[in-house]
Image (cartoon, grey):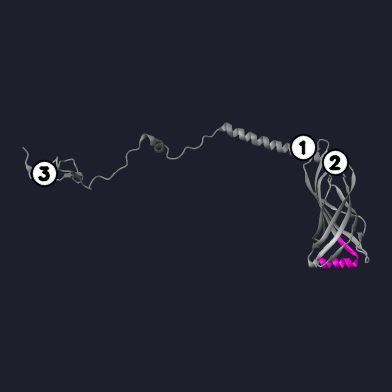
Amino acid sequence: MTSNEDRDKPVMGYPPQGQTSYNNNNSTGHPNYHNSQPTITNTAFPYSAPPPTAGNNYYIHHPYPSQPYYNPRRATFFRRIIIAAIAVLVILGTITFIMWLVLRPKLPEFRVDSASVTPFNASLGQVTGNWDIGLSVKNPNKKMNVYYDRIEASVFYDDEFLSETALAPFWQAKRNATTIRARFSAVGVYVNERSLKRIADDRSKGLVDFNLRMLAWVRFKAGAWRTRRHLMRVYCEGVKVGFSSSSGLGTLTGGANACKVDL
């Protein structure tokens, strides 16, 4: 038979800080399990995370994402495609170079043969006049035809723009020479004061230099072989027009003027 002191001793194996206490209002000293509510003290063990479940095993055994799988067949396939593309470019370049050696393409030749300006007036910051310029165009190639799909021409005084026009498309056979005309009209075109003064000085001396510039989109063809469209630039600098003192009519002075051609 146990005494009251034995009942009050803590049971071995249970930590005192984690024990459950009860509200006991019974005078007999025995806990009243029917009328009292258990009270949990704040001395419980610290909370620890539960062990990983089966769904998290991947992150346990594989902390980092796996590397992509290397496919040697796919790498070989792409390598062959790159080699084939390089081979095609080399073959096309070789064919083009051989065709250039065989055909020896040459740029067309441009020359100003005639020019007239009337009436020409430069005053009050404005220029008025009509230009009629005749050019000869020669195709020096022995095996290639030249197609001029589009031509735009402009007339300048130094770098001062005066007028522009578009010429009709045409084509030239091998060793062919063609004459074309470019007509311009300027009515009250503004120029800066410095250029206006220079024009007046040149006009008083009876000789004014104009510049003719053209842009032409051309193609070369030899049999079934043809080139893509190229932009050709033509510069006819220093076209000398002489003016008489009695009239506003000006004509080309000093003979034909050869032009520079760039492709």
Mark 2 or 1, closer to the camera: 2
Q: Earlier in the sequence, mark 2 or mark 1?
A: 1
Can you identify the residue that label 3 sits on? Answer: 8
Q: Mark yes or no: residue 90 visible.
A: yes
Q: Earlier in the sequence, mark 3 or mark 2?
A: 3
Q: Secondary structure at mark 3?
A: helix
Can you identify the residue that label 2 sits on? Answer: 145
Residue type, numbered disc 1:
Ile
84 with respect to 168 (left or right) = left
Can you identify the residue that label 1 sits on? Answer: 95
Mark 3 or 2, closer to the camera: 2
Estimate how packed mark 1 is, as few (under 14), some (14 to 19) or many (20 or more) residues with alpha carbons within 10 Å. few
Estimate how packed mark 3 is, as few (under 14), some (14 to 19) or many (20 or more) residues with alpha carbons within 10 Å. few
**In the picture shown, does residue 129 fall above or below 61?**
below
Q: Mark yes or no: residue 157 visible.
A: no
Residue pictured at 87% horizontal, 66% vertical:
202
- Residue 105 picture quarter: top right
Instruction: Specify start and end residues of the magenta stretch as a single range.
Output: 195-209
Residue pictured at 85% horizontal, 67% vertical:
200
Residue 17 x/y as whole percent:
20, 46
**In the picture shown, does residue 88 fall above or below 149?**
above
Count of all numbered marks drawn on residues in the image: 3
Q: Secondary structure at mark 2?
A: strand
Looking at the image, which is closer to me, 123 or 53? 123
Looking at the image, which is closer to me, 143 or 148? 148
